[in-house]
Image (cartoon, helix red, strand yellow):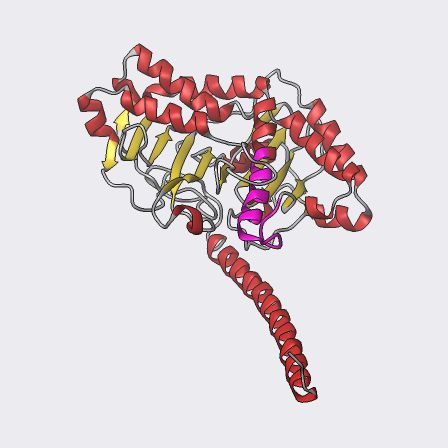
Amino acid sequence: MKWTLIQLFIFAFISINLDISAQVTDAERRGRFERMSSQSEERGLAEPFKGITTDGNIQPGLFKLESTGVSTESVQSAAVAFLESLDDDQKARATFPVDDDEWRKWMNQHFYIRQGVGFVDMTEKQRKAAFDLMGTSLSVEGLKLSKDIMKLNHTLGEINDNFEEYGEWLYWMTIMGEPSETEPWGWQIDGHHLIINYFVLGDQVVMTPFFVGSEPVIAEMGKYKGIEILQNEQNAGLKMMQSLNDDQKSAAVIEVSKDGNNNLTEAFKDNVVIDNEGVQVSSFTTAQKDQMLSLIKLYVDNMDEGHAKVKMEEVEKYLDDTWFAWIGGSEEDAVYYYRIQSPVILIEFDHQRPVATRQLYGNDVHRQHVHAVVRTPNGNDYGKDLLRQHYQRHKHD
């Protein structure tokens, strides 16, 4: 086929305009993301932080300023090393005051415009320093879970041929306050399906809000084929439900059908009121109580071993005042939501509708999209109750 000069001109004109159109679309998308982020923050931060409660009232006296006997020296040193690896511009972008609202500005959705320093912009040395900080703060399992979520986000990029919105390195680190042996500080990682808030005061640690998940949950293709996450949390929750007797099951089920997304404590839900629902653990047998503790431990054990032990002692203290709620079926291949709620911990696990994998899994709730959230109710997410007490004890300018 021979092209005339007029045809060549028309083709070139169309090509140029398609390129311009694509550029405009990219710019419009970025602008839309910025507006959506700003609007989410404005709505989410409209109320000052109070904390998650059962009735709108904080239960006092749950969290105390006291030594745990578990050193945080290695975490502090790793944070200093990470900051020292950054250049001046990166450090300015990565650091915030310890009481800054930046703690609360996290969101799972990929469109969110995040602060801090992104892994995508880090050198290999800086990435290693960031992972060293995470590794000293988390358990081996917690670090592996974090890295696997990042890798599965690469898988999502492969599925959609879209590495601008999905990818292994689209996660951002921030440091709140100045790493210290005695003064409050902390760090945060924020990105799609991975948000960790890690507050430190002396040798005390609060690691909530903690948000993990993925779509897909099991990589069936691509560079990281075979990686899977949250299978133990999924299966142990189901076994907990299946262990209940008929009366307990009847009490636990708050909705029979699972046809939507049910998590209540995701982004900008710091003050949500959630009544105790389901079955109370005080009605459990000794074996069932042990099973519940083992289920909770799967989540808490993402912290380093010493602080996980401290947290589990706190959880066990309020075990009889813990509630287990369920939505969905309880057969082996069911999709479901469960919630564990006590005065000192709240855990949600949720099978979700596909968002970016509908071409593979359809539109219905599916096991290939999971969200899990851990919170500290009654005002101590982000360590804020400990920070409040610290300020009362030590007057700051």
Q: Is residue 95 visible?
A: no
**Residue 55, how many percent across, how many down?**
32, 39
First to last magenta residue range: 148-167
- The answer to which quarter of the image holds residue 191 is top right
Q: Is residue 261 visible?
A: yes
The N terminus: image quadrant = bottom right
Type of secondary structure dominating the magenta stretch: helix
- Depth check: 208 or 64 in front? 208
Q: Looking at the image, which residue is at 26% across and 27% down?
A: 279
Q: Residue furthest bottom?
A: 6
**Residue 266, how many percent across, how many down?**
45, 44
**Residue 348, how many percent across, how many down?**
40, 35
Drawn side of residue 187 relative to residue 156, left or right? right
Drawn side of residue 262 relative to residue 371, left or right? left
- Depth check: 22 or 372 in front? 22
- The answer to which quarter of the image holds residue 86 is top right
The C terminus: image quadrant = top right
**Residue 225, how many percent across, how many down?**
56, 35
